[in-house]
Amino acid sequence: MNYVIAAAMGLLLGVFFYGGLWLTVRALLRSRYPVLLTISSFWARTLVTLAGFLFAMNGSWQNAIVCLAGFGLGRLAVSLLVPRDEGLPRCT
C-alpha cells in the first residue's frame, strides 16, 4: 500500500511542478517583472516538490523510486493535457 501512496504522491507532485511551470511560462509574456516571476516560481515549485518527495519517501529508497516514477507520469500527463498551440509567438 505504501507504493501506491508514493506513486500517487509522485503523480500529484509531477502535475504540480510541470503544471506550475506551464503557468509560469504563459504568465511571462504579461509579467512586469519576468525575472522575479521565474525565480520565485522555480523556488516555490522546487521546495514544495522536495518536501513532497521527502514526505512520500518515508525513509525508504524504494518509495523514492516509486515516487520518482509517478513524478515522470505526472510530467507525461501535463504534456498530454496542455494545449499545443495557443497563438504564442514562436522562437525560430
Image (tube, grey):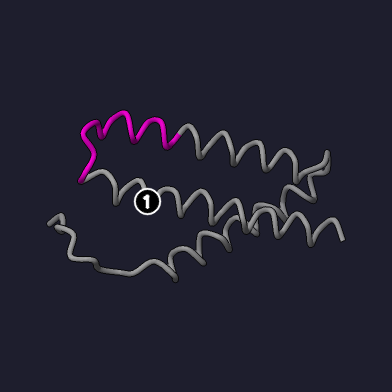
- Whether residue 84 sits left or right of residue 57 in the image: it is left
> Range of the magenta residues?
30-42
Q: Which residue corresponds to the image point at 51% horizontal and 48% vertical from the top-left?
A: 17
Point out residue 75 in the picture as x, y percentages from the top left corner.
Answer: 51, 59
Q: Secondary structure at mark 1?
A: helix
Residue 36 drawn above or below residue 18 = above
Point out residue 77 in the picture as x, y percentages from the top left corner.
Answer: 51, 67
Residue 32 drawn above or below residue 6 = above
Residue 60 or residue 25, whichever sits in front: 25
Q: Which residue corresponds to the image point at 50% horizontal and 34% vertical from the top-left?
A: 44
Point out residue 90 in the picture as x, y percentages from the top left corner.
Answer: 15, 59
- Whether residue 27 sits left or right of residue 69 in the image: it is left
Q: Which residue corresponds to the image point at 39% horizontal and 66% vertical from the top-left?
A: 82
Q: For the view shown, which residue lies furthest in the right direction?
A: 1
Residue 79 lies in quadrant? bottom left
Overall secondary structure of the magenta section: helix
Quarter containing the C terminus:
bottom left
Total marks placed: 1
On whether residue 26 falls in the magenta region, the answer is: no
Q: Which residue corresponds to the image point at 62% horizontal and 59% vertical from the top-left?
A: 11
* Mark 1: amino acid: Leu
Residue beneath disc 1: 23
Quarter containing the N terminus:
bottom right
* Mark 1 crowdedness (10 Å alpha carbons): few <14, some 14-19, many ≥20: few
- Whether residue 40 sits left or right of residue 92 in the image: it is right
Residue 86 lies in quadrant? bottom left
Residue 31 lies in quadrant? top left
